[in-house]
Amino acid sequence: MVRKLALVSAVTLLLLGILAAAGVAQSQWREMERLLADLASNRQPPQDTEFVFARVQFTSHGPGRGRRGDHRIEGWAHDYPDGEEHILQIAHEATGINLSKMSYVIVSLDSDEIFRYPFAYFSEVGEMTMTEREVSHLREYLNRGGFVVVDDFDGDSLEWFDSQMKMVFPNRSFVELSLVHPLFHTFYEIPTLEVLPPYPQRGDPKFYGYLDDHGRLSMILNLNNDLGDFWEWIDQPMYPLAPSTEGLRFGVNYFLYSLTH
């Protein structure tokens, strides 16, 4: 009887693993379908929204390039669109910002359209290989007061991204942020920066900032972390609840900070 129960338990765990893997694969197919459809239609956010989550498409030939299954999804698009829709829905319910879960857009870094959106999200910058026009646009975007969130990168990607940003502003560097920074207290009180990533990384999560010539924080970098993955899977038991909800709090704080600073 004991052996039979052990066998049943083992089979159950195996089936659950297979179902979970199938769920991830199905989600990735749906992600690709939505991405291609939205790019083809030049999907736009609602006109009456107060806030827009602009995911930035950039040239990607860097060392961080990877694959998802048998189908290549460039890193700038990872977690799209569920990541956007879930974090925007939370922000809609928790804050007074006039937005909806559809308040997002994909914008190319080399397009003048980027200047319409004060909040920009960059994913997997370890793949980034900016063109001269993209470098010029990012410089202008930050000079105009745009706020950038850099997510889903680890290990040597910080050094690679720093080399990319040296083309934008040769004399600026990233600085590690501490808990005293107002960003971590804009809406939610973040109790600690010693957080857990959704999956194993090459180091502990750290938060870096990028300051302009006036000391304004113009960019936040989530090193050795992937908040977008927490956002994408918050409606399913993919990750533990505590770090998942904390990932949402960081996201909402980023939104509010970009609107108030």
Image (cartoon, helix red, strand yellow):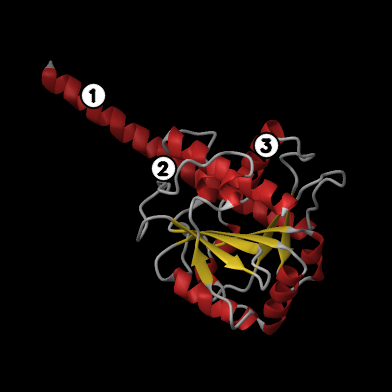
- Residue furthest to the right in view is 47
Choose top left, top right, bottom left or bottom right for residue 110.
Answer: bottom right
Question: Quick check: 133 left or right of 150?
Answer: right
Q: Nearer the viewer, residue 23 or 64?
A: 64
Which quarter of the rendered picture does the C terminus lie within?
bottom right
Identify the secondary structure beneath mark 3: helix
Residue beneath disc 1: 8
- Disc 1 crowd rating (10 Å Cα; few below 14, some 14-19, many 20+) is few
Query: Between marks 1 and 2, how big is the CA–CA gap?
Result: 20 Å
Q: Nearer the viewer, residue 218 or 51?
A: 218
**Amino acid type of the residue tagged 2 in the rendering:** Ala
Q: Nearer the viewer, mark 2 or mark 3?
A: 3
Question: Quick check: 238 left or right of 73?
Answer: left
The mark nearer the N terminus, 2 or 3, is 2
- Residue furthest to the left in view is 2
Identify the secondary structure beneath mark 2: helix
Q: Position of residue 203 (x, y in %)?
A: 35, 59
**Amino acid type of the residue tagged 1 in the rendering:** Val
Residue beneath disc 2: 21
- Disc 3 crowd rating (10 Å Cα; few below 14, some 14-19, many 20+) is some
Q: Position of residue 258 (x, y in %)?
A: 70, 53
Residue beneath disc 3: 89
Task: Name the residue rendered at 73%, 50% in the picture.
Answer: 260
Question: Quick check: 127 left or right of 117?
Answer: left
Query: Between marks 2 and 3, how big is the CA–CA gap?
Result: 26 Å
**Amino acid type of the residue tagged 3 in the rendering:** Gln
The mark nearer the N terminus, 1 or 3, is 1
Mark 1 vs 2: CB contact within 8 A: no
Identify the secondary structure beneath mark 1: helix
Mark 2 vs 3: CB contact within 8 A: no
Mark 1 vs 3: CB contact within 8 A: no
